[in-house]
């Protein structure tokens, strides 16, 4: 088929690559100037790349965890099909809490027990925790969530764009799609179109932007091998290692559509929280920080709707990297 895709974020790139590999003629339109990260880039570039189905049960629904486990298997298989190496690890993640905040962990642990009893978190003693991550502050409470992982988001997005080009995808950069209808993107005609514009799909969908903020820290002396999530009464701060001695620090969500740079308050709160569990970060250097808006629907759940001539896939909220492969697989199956 001749297929048009509006949006070249994570969903758009995955859809384009998989459909082109299947033999379809695919055209992708996106307002960005090119496939690389730049100003006003897709939210997928800003994301840390946490693949943590159990940890997302903190504020997510059980269906998100189910999609996440399916996506983890797809990521392993699909990344092997890319010619470019993409950093991917699946060593599990660690939940952390200071002694006075142990109660903050109980809600999440209880939800995991209800929704994923077959994957119980393993509470770690002080010696076990120190053996897994020697850089952690002594005296923390910790739990190991087995099977969870992470992906390097920038490497993956770049690799998907190049793989799509090799498969025959036609990328129309600097082109904003303003009207999506069955078989049509503005004045372009197709057999089928896919709307993956994120917030650009307003007002067709009741979307809101949810702000995410991240810092890249260069910490060459810090040895870190697992994604960490600090459970705190006010914050849900994550820290994860990337190649090149980089540690990414971020917060799960801020209910705001403000696209301005990261504030002083966020800087102090996020980095202080990270330093409270990783004291060696005191000598790290801030090499990059950014904020972006993730598209969310009123129920914070993704929406996949397929009708003759038109597929809409949107509202991935903060779970984009966790659930996108499973949703893309389902969308392509429905299209077939």
Image (cartoon, rainbow, N blue to C red):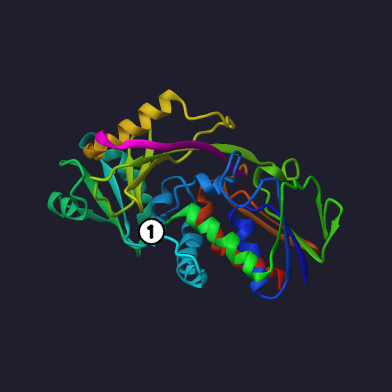
Of residue 153 and residue 91, the one placed in the foreground of this image is 153
Q: Position of residue 292 (x, y in %)?
A: 55, 38
* Residue range corresponding to the magenta coloring: 282-296
Q: Quadrant of residue 294?
A: top right
> In the drawing, does residue 24 fall left or right of residue 83?
right
Nearer the observer, 234 or 287: 287
Furthest residue toward bottom: 23
Residue 275 shows in this picture: yes
Which residue: 59% across, 46% down?
42
Where's residue 80, x and y in %? 47, 71
* Residue positioned 56% across, 38% down in the render: 210
Q: Is residue 94 magenta?
A: no
Give the quadrant of residue 103: top left
Quadrant, the N terminus: bottom right
Q: Is residue 332 left or right of residue 99?
A: right
* Residue denoted by label 1: 149
Q: In the rendered view, does 83 fall on the left or right side of 87?
A: right
Quarter of the image with the C terminus is: bottom right
| In magenta stretch: residue 294 | yes
As drawn, 82 above or below 186: below
Left or right: 29, with 99 as reference point: right
Image spot of residue 291 (x, y percent) = 51, 36
Q: Nearer the viewer, residue 58 or 283?
A: 283
Q: Helix, strand or loop at disc 1? A: strand
Give the residue at the far top of this rendering.
Answer: 264
Q: Nearer the viewer, residue 175 or 325?
A: 175
């Amino acid at each position: 088929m001749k297929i048009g895709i509006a949006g070249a974020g994570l969903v758009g790139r995955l859809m384009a690559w998989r459909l082109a590999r299947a033999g379809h003629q695919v055209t992708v339109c996106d307002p960005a100037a090119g496939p690389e990260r730049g100003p006003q880039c897709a939210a997928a570039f800003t994301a840390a790349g946490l693949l943590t189905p159990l940890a997302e049960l903190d504020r997510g629904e059980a269906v998100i965890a189910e999609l996440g486990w399916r996506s983890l298997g797809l990521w392993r298989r699909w990344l092997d099909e890319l010619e470019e190496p993409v950093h991917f690890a699946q060593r599990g993640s660690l939940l952390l809490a200071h002694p006075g905040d142990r109660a903050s962990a109980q809600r999440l642990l209880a939800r995991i027990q209800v929704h994923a009893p077959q994957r119980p978190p393993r509470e770690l003693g002080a010696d076990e925790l120190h053996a897994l991550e020697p850089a952690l502050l002594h005296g923390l409470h910790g739990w190991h969530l087995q099977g969870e992982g992470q992906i390097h988001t920038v490497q993956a997005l770049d690799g998907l764009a190049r793989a799509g080009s090799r498969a025959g995808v036609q990328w129309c950069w600097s082109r904003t799609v303003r009207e999506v209808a069955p078989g049509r993107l503005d004045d372009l005609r197709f057999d089928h179109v896919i709307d993956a514009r994120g917030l650009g799909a307003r007002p067709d969908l009741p979307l809101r932007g949810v702000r995410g903020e991240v810092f890249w820290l260069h910490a060459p002396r810090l040895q870190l091998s697992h994604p960490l999530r600090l459970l705190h009464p006010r914050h849900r701060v994550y820290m994860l290692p990337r190649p090149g001695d980089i540690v990414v620090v971020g917060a799960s969500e801020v209910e705001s559509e403000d696209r301005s740079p990261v504030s002083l308050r966020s800087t102090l709160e996020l980095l202080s929280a990270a330093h409270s569990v990783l004291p060696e970060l005191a000598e790290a250097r801030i090499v990059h920080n950014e904020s972006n808006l993730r598209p969310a629907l009123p129920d914070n759940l993704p929406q996949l709707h397929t009708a003759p001539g038109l597929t809409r896939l949107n509202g991935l909220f903060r779970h984009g990297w966790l659930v996108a492969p499973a949703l893309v697989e389902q969308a392509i199956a429905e299209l077939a």
